[in-house]
Image (cartoon, coloured by chain):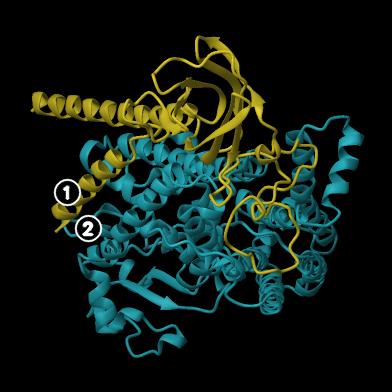
Amino acid sequence: MKQILYASSILLFVITAIFANPVPVSASEGDGGDGLEMEVNGYHVTLDSQNEWVKGENILVVTVTDSMGMPLSDVDVEILVAPKADGHDETETDSHDSAPQDSMSGMDMGGEPTQETGVMRPNNPSDAPAHDEESANPIAMTESEHGMYIVQTHLEATGEHDVHVMFHVDGEMLQADFVVKVTGSNSKNIVLWSFAAVNVALVAAAGVLKKQKSITVKGGK
Amino acid sequence: MALELKPRNKSIFAGGNLLQYKPIDRFMRSRWFPGIIQWPTLILFMVIMFQLLLGPESAHDNLGTALTWVLWWPIIPIIFLFLGRFWCAICPFATINDLVQKFVGNNRPVPKFLKKYGIWIIDALFIFITWSDHVWGVVENPFGSGILMLTLTTGVIASGSFFERRTFCRHVCFLGGLSGNYARTGMLALRGTPEICATCTIAACYKGTEKAPGCPLFEFPKTMDSNANCVICADCIKNCPNDSIQLTVRPPTKELWFVRKPKMEEAFLSAVIMGIVFVQNVTMLEVWSSMLKWLENAVGTTNYAITFSITFAIAIIIPVALLGLTSWFASKFNKVSLVENFTRFGYAIIALDVAAHIAHNLFHLLAEGKSIFYTALALFGQEVHGASPALVSMETIQILQFGLIGLGFIGSLYAAYRIAKSSHPNGKAWTTFAPYAVLMVILTAMNIYLFILPMAMRM
């Protein structure tokens, strides 16, 4: 019985380790795998992030080509990134006075006269509030190469974001709307792998010591 | 013959042995116990870890956060009250310890410094973890909670790899220290039968047999007179060839009435826990923001780590200082040193600690309980919008909180009276008790005042 329990627990560990593989999943991308793509009035718009849509600093890249596949140069391109309106705003503000209820969708927390302070972590009014991406204005992008426009932006939150790319052609404003998923920073992966490495090292060291001990005992006999 | 010495016919409410009932006896002796509870707990723990580390980053949406801080943390002191330290028998960290030990364990003896300073280390860890939770955010940040769990996992893996039995649980685990203190109020007690143990020379309960390992927490039921380090894993019940072990029900807090070998560090921890409950509540006062502002101006920094540390230190110092002051005052009457009074009567606070801890967390359990179902449903794509997570109304919760504080007050007051009576039978009992009665009134009043104020939620 115990053997079965031990075997099943090891199996569970393995399954957990497989599913827990902490590789960030980038935004769902187009066929090419280099970015999100969309057709707007015959214009082909691609959107990509050089940082794979990870929370924090991101360099966003937009390319616009016409129906012939020719890059569209010297046009005004603007971009607006905002957490998806009906999605989960998972802003990690680290702000002690952030009200968890406010930043999350869904539950009404009962309407009780609660104060917006932490239970286990109190509020800290001195912390700056998080950047509100939803209230941000569109940012003008700079043309770095022929038909390629870039901008550097800071993504405050993880989760799904609406990205609106606006460009002006022949006096007409065209807009391409994308949805991207912003994932957590890679530092999480480093932390998790560090823990995994330390634990594996501990178990390996103990295993080696135990083996040496058993050899010594056998040799002694 | 030995069996006849056991009080087989006594009612369980009169201190009769629960093991006289065949189904209980069979269950405790079964090889399925405690595994049948232990292994599902480990599986649940893995789900929690997965959610905390890789699930939604918002505490509000994270099932791991809900299961840990809305369900587990509030019910754990209740478990200690009814079942003593049984949680530690099924704790997933202990299971990991045992698992690692089975395969690669070197079973080295416990380092001497851990034996000597273990409880002080636990005290320090408990203070540090509570402090870090406030400063860095653990409860409200699923990943932070996950890191705390991973740190504990690393601790038990290290301990299980190199040291014998459950060294980590006995000498390092901060929750073990807390549970050791709280379990003293527990209603379930496991002890050897003195008459039988007196003639025993094999000590199978401590050493272990082919049936089960020796006591995982290094206890010897023959001499054990406290619940502090008994996890009711039933290994000793399985091992004892003389059928000496008894499992009895006793009045809550009974163990506090007389502690044979009181320890300064345990008395200190009981006062510290009271301070921690204070700080959890104080940070929810309406004036907290202005208090913090005032403090920032006073110390000339807006660094939250510094301002909170000052607040935290004050909150912890208050009950420790009050206990010290009371002990000094009592020493004027009973002519016993301050340290001895502090050490002996510190245990009386534990009842109020447990009550305040349960009362504090009752809010989270009852006002946010449904969030466990909502976050679980979200795993299957079922979003719940606009529904209240409360199980009962705020008024009901407050009534329960005040009731609990009232019971804690009675428990502490009576424990102080019994300690005074047993340590000063020569007529100084009442004069020794009086200052501690005042202390219990003050601590209770402080708790009641803090519980009048509304609380914020975890989810």
Image quarter of residue B379: bottom left
Does residue B117 appear to the left or right of A32 in the view shown? right
How many discs mark residues in the rendered view?
Answer: 2
Query: Depth check: B201 or B225 in front?
Result: B225
Instruction: Indicate which disc residue B342 carries.
Output: none
Residue B218 in sight: no
Q: Secondary structure at mark 2?
A: loop
Q: Quadrant of the N terminus of chain B?
A: bottom left
**Chain whose colour in the figure is cyan:** B
Chain ID, mark 2: B
- Kindly identify the amino acid type of the residue bearing the numbered disc 1: Ala
State left or right for residue B274 relative to residue A13: right
The yellow chain is A
Tell me where residue B179 appears, x and y as whole percent.
Answer: 52, 58
Q: Secondary structure at mark 1?
A: helix
The alpha-carbon separation of the residues under discs 2 and 1 comes to 19 Å
Q: Is residue A49 above or below residue B440?
A: above
Q: Chain of mark 1?
A: A
Q: Residue at x 54, y 68 (%)?
A: B369
What residue did someone put label 1 on? A7
Do tag 2 and tag 1 residues touch (Cβ < 8 Å)?
no
> Mark 2 or 1, which is nearer the eye?
1
Which residue occupies the extreme front position in the image? A170
> Which residue is denoted by mark 2 in the rendering?
B212
B134 above or below B440? above
